[in-house]
Amino acid sequence: MKYEFKVKNYSLEKTLLSGQAFRWNKIGDKYVGVVGDSIVEVEEVPGGFATEVKHGSLGKVDLTRYLAVDEDYESIISAISKDKAVRDSLETHKGYRILRQNPYEALISFIDSANNSIRNIRKQVDTLSMMFGERVSEDYYKFPDVDVLAGLTEEEIKKAGVGFRGKYMISTSQELVKNNILDKISELEGNVAHDRLKEFHGVGDKIADCVLLFAYNRLDRVPIDVWTRRIFEKYYSRSCKDKYEELHECASALHGKYAGYAFSFLFEAIRK
DNA sequence: TTCCAGGACCCTG
DNA sequence: CAGGGTCATGGA
């Protein structure tokens, strides 16, 4: 099925290849990715972009949600633009959007992000899908189902190249098979949801916030990592202790309910 | 060869 | 709590 989206200020490249999602590739002029059970092709056209869903059930409503096309982007930009550092980063990185990914896929993918490079994460998530996910078409595989990963041995999952993170993926999946709380996360208040996610083996402060920001649309959550700390040093040399919770409080105080967006722009800017 | 990659865990003091 | 070592893997 083909769908067209009219939307301003949407950069497919910055959004789909940024490191918030790991299953998109640019092939020629098109971006091709696997979303749920579908292969999606996206291409820029005048006034927005065109999508084609191959093999799969993904509809326009699902895509609108996943790609955050319905987001009130101008309001967000306007709100965080009060800050000069953010304004500067927007000059280069406006058009970046925060996706709304599947929570399980995001959880496992970001468990894979621990002490790892984006390049490797991409490769490993791809291999995981190829080895343990359902085949969609010739070269494309769905992200593995939770009960499949839950049934693997550490030896088996390590063949996907995920290293020491494999055991975390398995135990997290096993916990979810026993008690799938991922739907309930959305009902929890921010800090509570954050702490609940941290109960999974392999999920610490930063990864919990990645999942909240990139899957649950919690735009106020800020994954604090080395880059975030560099951002604080460079732009906000104020007195917040070098402790995760304190830094997150500072980020909130600076940018409020869209702090996740603000720091995503700053992150993209400083990482270059 | 060594170091680092969007960290988290575990053990000490 | 704060500070270390450790964990697989690939690329520079």
Image: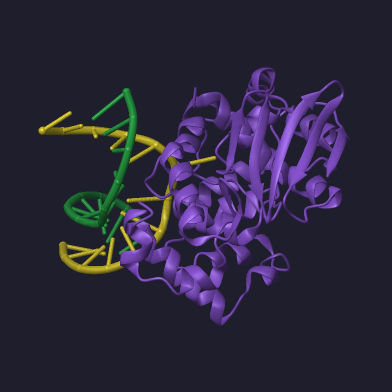
Chain colours: A purple, B yellow, C green
Residue placed most toward the observer, A53 or A234: A53
Q: Could you tell whether A218 is left or right of A239 in the image?
A: right
Q: Residue at x 50, y 64 (%)?
A: A198
Please provide percent x and percent y for residue A12: 70, 30
**Residue drawn 73% across the image and 68% down it:** A187
Query: Residue at (46%, 39%) from the top-left corner?
Result: A118
Residue at (52% x, 34% y) in the render = A238
Name the one closer to the observer, A176 or A51.
A51
**Image location (x, y in percent) of residue A195:** 55, 66
Q: Quadrant of residue A85?
A: top right
Q: Quadrant of the N terminus of chain A?
A: top right
Residue A192 in the image, given as x and y percentages of width and height: 62, 67
In the rendered structure, the answer to whether residue A265 lies left or right of residue A235 reads right
Q: Number of callouts in the render?
A: 0
Q: Nearer the viewer, residue A253 or A263?
A: A263
Q: Which of A143/A166 is in front?
A: A143
